[in-house]
Image (spheres, rainbow, N blue to C red):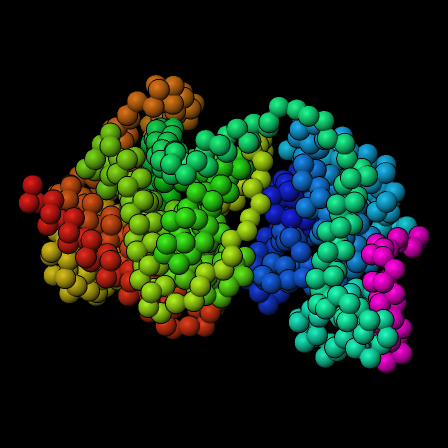
């Protein structure tokens, strides 16, 4: 039987660890959650030279003395799961800071290969690293890599396999005679008094944790530092807090290693420092970021418009083909209506926006991979501190622009429970990709060339409302001081195409899978509610009656008709359903099942010819120096647009988009927030604040707009 070798990949955030893992595993990564928690884990099974390699990508962490959930997971895996070998990925340009974690990993007794990533960047900065000397001093293999270019990866993996198979004892990190004497004293005490503990924990690591007074280890083991030991008493008398003594010893050893192994040659300031002087300027940084976000939306919409148009043709041809097949199979009228009016019109109205969402995620992934988005945390720290947050809270909130659910889970990187609760309360105001189809549909119907700017304004409005809510909460319900903000800035990089495509697809896949599963089920439910009781028109169906019942509430917002009310009701289940429901109600092309239907040969010819033309048109749109491109001429479902124009005007349309942005998070977000905090109070704040702000702003937009 082939032995499986477990290789853990550990390192600080922003060291290129994820790029390293993706380059090794490609798209073979499996994504799930760690048992018992909702922090995402990535793992892959590789085969090399007849060996099965189980690659586990641990959450990025600065230390194994944990405070956040990610740090706890990383430490527990190394200490309790005991991987065969650890690939410790470090940033070669900031070696001293990264070596602190390396020393802590070595304390666990795991075999370690030190991976000096971004080695080319270190050389450009004039750093000359003596690899052989560093390897000899640490007693572990040291391999230079450039993950974005795929350099050194196989060598690092090969070193890991050789080390995992080696029976040689591991070299221990030496912290000086006093600390080593204390460690030996505690190890002997543990062996004498609790010998069974060695089965569960490495004795040297446990001795160090007892010296530190690590609260989690003390709670798990029921042990405490044996203060009656002579050397322990002496160290406490001389140094006081022994955890500070160990921290100083690790940092001192890391600094000594760097002094002995690195020579720094004077070079010009790196490009990242020059860019930061501009992009992190307190006056120029915020408007430049706003401009960057505007360009993101403009590029996404201009480039994706031909692909959305092509995708709409593909869905139309698919619907025509299904109509032809169903006609010749003589299916019942109700089944024909369910498939064509329910699934094709409902799911198709959402799925047509997949190209736009993919392009938007691609551009955002570029900004993320380049290192720019990490700097947003520093840009907004001053503003966030005014409303009771700090810059690190911006990182989970940025994820909310893709989907609010990962935003909720990502708050685990925040140390303070108060910061986590406040950030989760703000998550629904970050406009997720599910709301984007609503914006595009209404912006295309009413705002033409200005559609991109209108949609950008909605994203900005969501952030403003979130900040106002944060200010209210921190002065009423959450009066505690925010946590400290410490974060390392990654260097600027040029992301590779493989990195961009893989990560953009990962972010788009959530939308695609949702459209193919969850939205299919809800679309069938909506179809049933629109066609029951039998023999009634849509207005008098169950969903039509519910929409008509709540419609008067929206009279001050300008859309007091049952169709809008019904769409907003289903939008609580999933925001994509707003467009899907309107698609089913208005129907892009109503046909009687009994009518003669021919196979849509011409439609398929247009689809086949249209794809290469879409690439040409997309290139022209970008080449035209960001000239405005009218989405109206290239938008999906022109008949649906016409129906919307009959029911709305520009002010009520914008009010409807704002209401969709704010009125309530979807059920999945509410479930995720409750699973994290078990707090009905938090859910009430999220829903209540959203409804209040949505209704108030909707009234102001419509009423003030009509005054002029």
| Name of the residue lying farthest toward the left | 707
Task: Say whether residue 676 is left or right of residue 221.
Answer: left
| Residue at left offset 51%, top offset 57% | 484
Does residue 235 sit above or below 703 in this rendering? Answer: below
Task: Tell me: 402 left or right of 158.
Answer: left
Above or below — where is 542 with respect to 603?
A: below
Q: Position of residue 493 (x, y in %)?
A: 57, 32
The magenta segment: 167-196
Say which of 27 and 503 sits in front.
Answer: 503
Q: At x 28% / y 66%, what residue is drawn?
A: 688
Please say if 239 is above or below 271: below
- Please state, as top left, top right, bottom left or bottom right, where the N terminus lies in the image: bottom right
Which quadrant is the C terminus positioned in? top left
Look at the magenta stretch and give its main secondary structure.
helix
Q: Residue at x 33, y 59 (%)?
A: 471
Up-down relation of residue 36 to residue 276 (above or below): below
Image coordinates for residue 3, horizontal then vertical, percent: 83, 54
Name the residue at the front extreme.
238
Residue 684, image x, y percentages: 33, 69
Q: How many marks?
A: 0
Name the foreground residue: 174 vs 594.
174
Query: Is residue 68 in sight in this rendering?
Result: yes
Magenta stretch encompasses residue 191: yes
Answer with the quarter of the image where residue 706 lies: top left
Q: Is residue 75 something one can see in this rendering?
A: no
- Compared across the picture, whether 553 is left or right of 138 comes to left
Quadrant in the rendering for residue 189: bottom right
Along the line of sight, the residue nearer the viewer: 683 or 30:
683
Q: Position of residue 287 (x, y in %)?
A: 35, 35
């Amino acid at each position: 039987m082939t032995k499986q070798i477990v290789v853990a990949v550990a390192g600080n955030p922003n060291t290129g660890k994820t790029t390293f893992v993706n380059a090794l595993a490609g798209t073979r990564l499996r994504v799930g959650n760690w048992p018992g928690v909702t922090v995402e884990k990535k793992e892959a099974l590789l085969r090399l030279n007849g060996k099965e390699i189980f690659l586990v990508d641990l959450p990025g962490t600065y230390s194994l003395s944990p405070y956040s959930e990610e740090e706890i997971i990383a430490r527990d895996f190394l200490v309790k799961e005991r991987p065969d070998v650890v690939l410790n990925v470090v940033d070669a340009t900031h070696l001293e800071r990264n070596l602190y974690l390396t020393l802590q990993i070595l304390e666990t007794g795991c075999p370690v290969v030190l991976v000096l990533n971004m080695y080319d960047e270190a050389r450009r900065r004039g750093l000359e690293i003596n690899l052989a000397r560093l390897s000899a001093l640490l007693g572990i293999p040291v391999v230079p890599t450039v993950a974005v270019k795929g350099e050194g990866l196989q060598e690092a993996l090969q070193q890991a396999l050789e080390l995992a198979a080696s029976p040689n004892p591991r070299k221990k990190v030496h912290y000086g005679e006093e600390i080593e004497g204390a460690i030996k004293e505690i190890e002997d005490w543990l062996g004498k008094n609790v010998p069974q503990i060695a089965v569960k924990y490495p004795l040297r690591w446990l001795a160090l944790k007892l010296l530190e007074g690590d609260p989690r280890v003390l709670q798990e083991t029921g042990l405490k530092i044996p203060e009656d030991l002579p050397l322990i008493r002496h160290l406490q008398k001389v140094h006081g807090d022994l955890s500070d003594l160990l921290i100083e010893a690790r940092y001192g050893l890391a600094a000594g290693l760097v002094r002995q192994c690195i020579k720094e040659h004077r070079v010009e300031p790196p490009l990242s420092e020059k860019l930061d002087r501009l992009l992190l300027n307190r006056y120029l940084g915020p408007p430049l970021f706003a401009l960057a976000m505007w360009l993101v939306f403009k590029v996404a919409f201009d480039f994706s418009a031909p692909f959305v148009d092509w995708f709409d043709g593909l869905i139309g041809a698919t619907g025509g083909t299904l109509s032809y097949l169903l006609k010749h199979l003589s299916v019942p009228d109700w089944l024909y209506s369910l498939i064509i009016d329910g699934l094709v019109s409902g799911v198709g109205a959402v799925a047509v926006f997949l190209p736009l969402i993919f392009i938007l995620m691609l551009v955002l992934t570029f900004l993320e991979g380049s290192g720019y988005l990490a700097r947003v945390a520093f840009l907004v720290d001053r503003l966030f501190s005014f409303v009771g947050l700090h810059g690190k809270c911006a990182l989970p909130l940025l994820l909310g622009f893709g989907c609010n659910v990962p935003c909720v889970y990502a708050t685990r990187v925040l140390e303070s429970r108060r910061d986590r609760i406040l950030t989760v309360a703000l998550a629904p105001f970050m406009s997720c990709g599910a709301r984007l189809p609503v914006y595009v549909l209404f912006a295309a119907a009413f705002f033409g060339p200005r559609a991109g700017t209108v949609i950008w304004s909605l994203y900005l409005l969501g952030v403003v409302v979130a900040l106002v809510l944060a200010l209210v909460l921190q002065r009423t319900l959450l009066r505690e001081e925010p946590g400290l903000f410490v974060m390392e800035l990654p260097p600027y990089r040029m992301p590779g195409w493989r990195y961009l495509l893989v990560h953009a697809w990962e972010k788009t896949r959530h939308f695609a899978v949702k459209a193919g599963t969850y939205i299919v089920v809800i679309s069938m439910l909506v179809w049933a509610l629109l066609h029951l009781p039998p023999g009634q028109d849509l207005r008098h169906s169950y969903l039509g009656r519910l929409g008509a019942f709540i419609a008067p509430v929206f009279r001050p917002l300008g859309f007091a008709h049952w169709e809008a009310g019904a769409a907003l009701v289903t939008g609580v289940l999933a925001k994509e359903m707003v467009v899907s429901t309107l698609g089913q109600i208005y129907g892009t092309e109503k046909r009687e099942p009994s009518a003669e239907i021919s196979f849509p040969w011409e439609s398929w010819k247009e689809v086949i010819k249209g794809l290469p033309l879409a690439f040409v048109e997309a290139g022209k749109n970008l080449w035209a120096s960001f000239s405005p491109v009218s989405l109206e001429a290239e938008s999906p479902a022109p008949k649906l647009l016409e129906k919307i124009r009959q029911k709305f005007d520009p002010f009520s349309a914008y009010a409807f988009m704002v209401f969709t942005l704010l009125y309530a998070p979807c059920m999945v977000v509410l479930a995720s927030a409750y699973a994290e905090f078990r707090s009905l109070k938090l859910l009430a704040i999220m829903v209540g604040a959203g409804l209040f702000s949505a209704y108030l702003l909707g009234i102001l937009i419509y009423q003030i707009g009509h005054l002029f």
